[in-house]
């Protein structure tokens, strides 16, 4: 199964996503709580997929997405953010994100989107 | 502060709470305060920037916060630890994110900052505009929404509601 890097500044969201994705059969490559750490870990871990929050301190998800895509134009990044950040989501899609998930999320939808993105 | 600025937060609060605790809350009476402050034990403070600027504060008792965090974690009970704090912060993030979409649709394009969790009663946040306050009553207790926002720029043309329904769901 694809290896996923989970990026979210909220410990709760990282824990929920890791549990959900593990149960769905994904491998967790690692986790990051800022965009800066995500970019560093992407180079180190070379995950198949990245699940990226948008609103984060230090470096937001949009900036991290752009840096990752610059490093690896084939990177598969799915944005995961609070309902209401659609403008940022659209900017992310234009910057190379494969898809997006809105919180509060539906577990089945998360798995479906990630499987499609990894295909 | 315009009364219309709190309505998106009430709408978002009702919707997100219903989603995460699987029960429809009820809203109470609107009140005005000279500044944003909370008498609640746990408060989530989120900044709003853009065409309107200020703060949204979501206050609740420790018992209510703990029960909501447990529901969000699909657990029967939990202590109000770091994980519960993170869950409650995320609740504020989700409500504010939805509210700013509604504000943007009304022509007030704005963004939110990451949530800050504050514990302690009688916490006052310095604001340059009076705060509007409205309680939401849930099966787990009351959550009080404080909103202190003021316009900073030109209102843009209103936009139609965005199609976000496809990914809204009931089980966060």
Image (cartoon, coloured by chain):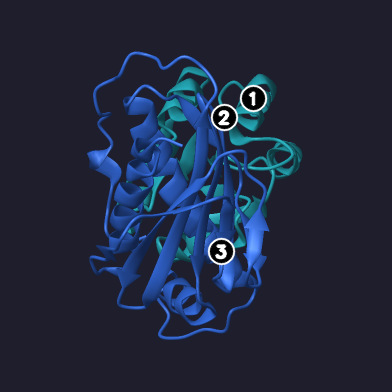
Of the chain colours in the picture, the one used for chain B is: blue
Residue visible at 56% across and 72% down in the picture: B84
| Above or below, comparing residue B118 to residue A102 in the picture | below
Residue visible at 59% across and 68% down in the picture: B85
Of the chain colours in the picture, the one used for chain A is: cyan
| Above or below, comparing residue B157 to residue B64 in the picture | above
Q: Secondary structure at mark 3?
A: strand
The image position of residue B59, as x and y in percent, is 51, 65
| Along the viewing direction, whichever of B119 and B3 lies nearer the viewer | B3
Asked whether, in this view, residue B23 is left or right of residue A114, the answer is left
Asked whether, in this view, residue B77 is left or right of residue A46, the answer is left
Which residue in the structure is indicated by mark 1?
A72
Q: Quadrant of the C terminus of chain B?
A: bottom left
Q: How far, Cα to Cα, is label 1 from label 3?
A: 47 Å
Badge 3 density bin: few <14, some 14–19, many ≥20, Cα 10 Å: many
Residue visible at 27% across and 53% down in the picture: B169
Q: Are marks 3 and 2 on the same chain?
A: no
């Amino acid at each position: 199964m694809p290896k996923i890097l989970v990026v979210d500044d909220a410990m709760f969201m990282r824990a929920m996503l890791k549990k959900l994705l593990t149960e769905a059969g994904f491998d967790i490559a690692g986790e990051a709580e800022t965009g800066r750490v995500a970019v560093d870990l992407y180079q180190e871990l070379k995950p198949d997929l990245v699940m990226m929050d948008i609103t984060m301190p230090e470096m937001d998800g949009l900036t991290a997405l752009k840096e990752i895509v610059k490093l690896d134009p084939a990177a598969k990044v799915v944005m995961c953010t609070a309902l209401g950040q659609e403008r940022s989501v659209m900017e992310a899609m234009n910057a190379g994100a494969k898809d997006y998930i809105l919180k509060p999320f539906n577990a089945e939808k998360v798995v479906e989107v990630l499987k499609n993105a990894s295909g | 502060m315009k009364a219309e600025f709190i309505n998106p937060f009430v709408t978002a609060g009702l919707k997100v709470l219903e989603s995460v605790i699987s029960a429809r809350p009820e809203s109470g009476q609107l009140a005005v305060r000279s500044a944003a402050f909370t008498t609640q034990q746990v408060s989530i403070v989120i900044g709003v920037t853009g065409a309107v600027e200020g703060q949204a504060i979501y206050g609740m008792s420790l018992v209510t916060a703990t029960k909501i965090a447990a529901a969000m974690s699909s657990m029967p009970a939990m202590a109000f630890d770091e994980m519960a704090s993170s869950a409650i912060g995320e609740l504020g993030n989700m409500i504010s994110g939805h509210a700013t979409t509604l504000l943007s649709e009304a022509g007030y394009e704005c963004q939110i900052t990451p949530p800050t969790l504050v514990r302690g009663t009688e916490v006052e946040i310095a604001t340059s505009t009076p705060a509007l306050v409205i309680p939401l009553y849930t099966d787990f207790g009351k959550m009080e929404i404080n909103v202190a926002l003021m316009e900073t720029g030109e209102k843009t043309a209103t936009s139609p509601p965005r199609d976000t329904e496809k990914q809204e769901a009931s089980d966060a």
